[in-house]
Image (cartoon, rainbow, N blue to C red):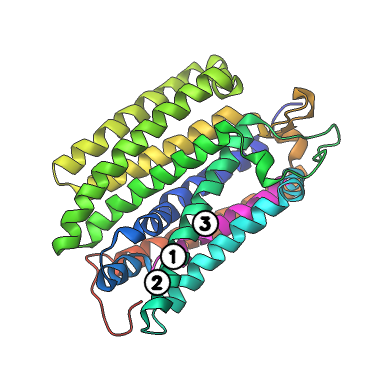
């Protein structure tokens, strides 16, 4: 079955929404991962307030992604949520708890109270990032889909933790930690700013190590990860650009250009999202039982009429999302300044 223009449009749009979420909420999650490295209460408040005005708006991209997946590819949406219900509920709990920890931390001055919510903020951010990576790894590794497009059985968290998905999960943690450290470098000053420069270098070397591990693992153990490159040789251009972007991150850090380092880090994340989509193409969910059971784009898509109506809505709605994002980032640009009513 051939993929139609509307089906391809929605597949690409889902990739754009996923990349937007990974870039924007990625540094939020990265700040949470790095949160325990702050040495006192003031530094922890600075780190939280660097993302305080932005994190809930950044998560809009995930909400829109979920809505678009439900409308455009309901079969894939239903299969994923039925088979991975426990994992998705745990991820949702982490995202909710992260927001709750930010709001509750400053409500009381007791040290034990703030330590608990500091731990909750870091743990929920780290676990959510790890679960995102595990989901990506399992999507490439394959899930037990049957002939009817449904899971043969629900996948437990233990079943999801194969070596490759775990490596991808750890890679996601290092990538978002690096992205968060680069963001904090733009938003802080003084002693904290100096220490964050050291964090960036540590995060970069950890990220580079996990990047090499995941790349070698994918090439050797996941045949479908590289199959698309044989059909689409032009995709090697993205790989080369991605490697060059990774190499530019330490260069920008060394030259003291935080904005350039942040934009380069965003490009790296966008490239990874593109390569993930290309590795899956033309599928949304890969079956580990048989390639015949894969949920391909045409098999999982809504009707052409539904896709057409939703495309009109997307063209009308996306400018509002982009405008809102641009305005918020412009209003809250510059270094973090603490006030009495700050987090």
Q: Which numbered circle lies on residue 95?
A: none
Q: Quadrant of the image for the N terminus?
A: top right
Under circle 1, the secondary element is: helix
Verify whether residue 57 appears in magenta: yes
Most frequent secondary structure within the magenta stretch: helix
Whether the residues at callouts 1 and 2 have beta carbons within 8 Å, the answer is: yes
Q: Earlier in the sequence, mark 1 or mark 3?
A: 3
Q: Position of residue 331 (x, y in %)?
A: 30, 69
Q: Which residue is mark 1?
A: 119
Vertical order, 276 against 197 (above or below): above
Vertical order, 334 against 250 (above or below): below
The residue lying at 55 percent from left, 29 percent from top is 278
Q: Which residue is mark 2?
A: 115
> Mark 2 against mark 3, which lies toward the viewer?
2
Residue 199 relative to residue 61: left or right: left
Magenta residues, start to end: 53-73
Q: Work out how far the residue at label 1 is from the one at label 3, CA to CA, in angstroms.
A: 26 Å
Q: Could you say which quadrant of the image residue 265 lies in?
A: top left
Q: Which numbered circle lies on residue 61?
A: 3
Furthest toward the front, the residue is 112
Residue 142 relative to residue 170: left or right: right
Evaluate whether residue 313 shows in this view: no
Residue 22 relative to residue 302: left or right: left
Q: Position of residue 28 (x, y in %)?
A: 40, 58
């Amino acid at each position: 079955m051939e993929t139609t223009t509307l089906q391809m449009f929605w597949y690409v749009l889902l990739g754009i929404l996923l990349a937007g979420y990974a870039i924007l909420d990625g540094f939020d999650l990265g700040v949470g991962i790095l949160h325990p490295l702050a040495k006192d209460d003031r530094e922890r408040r600075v780190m939280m307030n660097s993302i305080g005005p932005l994190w809930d708006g950044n998560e809009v991209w995930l909400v829109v992604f979920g809505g678009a997946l439900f409308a455009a590819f309901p079969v894939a949406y239903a299969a994923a949520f039925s088979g991975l219900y426990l994992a998705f509920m745990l991820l949702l709990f982490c995202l909710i708890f992260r927001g709750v920890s930010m709001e509750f931390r400053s409500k009381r001055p007791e040290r034990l109270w703030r330590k608990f919510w500091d731990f909750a903020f870091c743990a929920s951010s780290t676990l959510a990032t790890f679960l995102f990576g595990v989901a990506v790894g399992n999507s490439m590794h394959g899930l037990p889909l049957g002939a009817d497009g449904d899971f043969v059985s629900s996948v437990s968290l233990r079943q999801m933790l194969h070596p490759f998905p775990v490596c991808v999960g750890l890679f996601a943690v290092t990538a978002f930690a690096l992205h968060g450290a680069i963001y904090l470098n733009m938003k802080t000053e003084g002693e904290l700013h100096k220490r964050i420069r050291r964090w960036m270098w540590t995060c970069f070397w950890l990220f580079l190590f996990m990047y090499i591990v995941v790349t070698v693992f994918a090439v050797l153990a996941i045949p479908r990860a590289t199959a698309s490159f044989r059909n689409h040789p032009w995709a090697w251009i993205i790989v080369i650009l991605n490697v060059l972007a990774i190499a530019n991150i330490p260069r920008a850090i060394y030259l003291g250009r935080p904005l350039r380092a942040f934009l380069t880090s965003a490009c790296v994340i966008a490239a990874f999202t593109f390569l993930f989509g290309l590795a899956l193409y033309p599928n949304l969910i890969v079956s580990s039982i048989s390639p015949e059971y894969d949920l391909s784009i045409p098999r999982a898509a809504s009707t052409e009429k539904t896709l057409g109506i939703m495309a009109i809505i997307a063209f009308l709605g996306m400018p509002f999302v982009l405008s809102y994002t641009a305005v918020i980032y412009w209003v809250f640009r510059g270094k973090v300044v603490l006030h009495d009513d700050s987090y």
